[in-house]
Amino acid sequence: RKLKVMTTTAHGHATTNGKRSLEPNGNASIDASKQQRLTLESVKDYYGKVLSKTEDLKTNACCTAESVPDRVKAAIKHVHPDVLAKYYGCGIVAPQQLEGCRVLDLGCGSGRDVYILAQFVGEKGEVVGVDMTDEQLAVAREHEEWHRSEFSYA
């Protein structure tokens, strides 16, 4: 039996035609690719360095605690506390029939949803988490063996 949980880093690469755009007043604006790089670095810095625990998240756009199904609540109990402490997501989509499926979690962060979904896909399924924040992925990777043992997929 083997737990198939993988986390990888995705580094965004902005592509543009290299042209500068004009603002309504006729002035040249920042090159689009430079602006995209600045945004990417800002997001990576916020999720990788500024936030240290779930409570640090400065948004009310997500409401995950109110409507979590019982089976997800039960699965959360089998996720390492350090992974839970670094959860900054907006909820989880977990259809009933996931046994043996392959699931891709884009923006997986510390891996909370990856480890929840790994319980639902079982040992014949696969969950892949992709994130652009090395610090978040380090948390997910640090606890891979713990989860393999917890799920008995070792």
Image: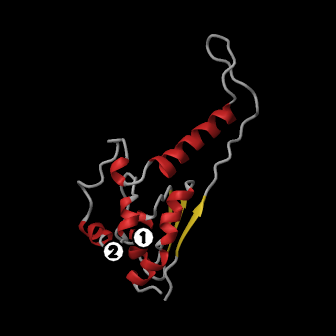
At a point 32% along the width and 68% down the height, the residue shown is 76
x and y percentages locating residue 118 in the rendered image? 43, 73
Q: SS for tag 1?
A: helix
Please state which amino acid type lies under the numbered disc 1.
Answer: Tyr
Q: Give the residue furthest to the top.
A: 25
At a point 67% along the width and 26% down the height, the residue shown is 30
Q: Give the residue pinned by disc 1.
A: 115
Mark 1 crowdedness (10 Å alpha carbons): few <14, some 14-19, many ≥20? many
Q: Give the residue furthest to the right.
A: 18
Asked whether, in this view, residue 22 is left or right of residue 133, the answer is right
At a point 50% along the width and 50% down the height, the residue shown is 49
State yes or no: discs 2 and 1 in contact (Cβ < 8 Å): yes
Q: Give the residue pinned by disc 2.
A: 78
Q: Distance between the residues labelled 2 and 1?
A: 8 Å
x and y percentages locating residue 28 in the rendered image? 69, 18
Q: How many marks?
A: 2
User: Is residue 30 placed above or below 146 in the rendered structure?
Assistant: above
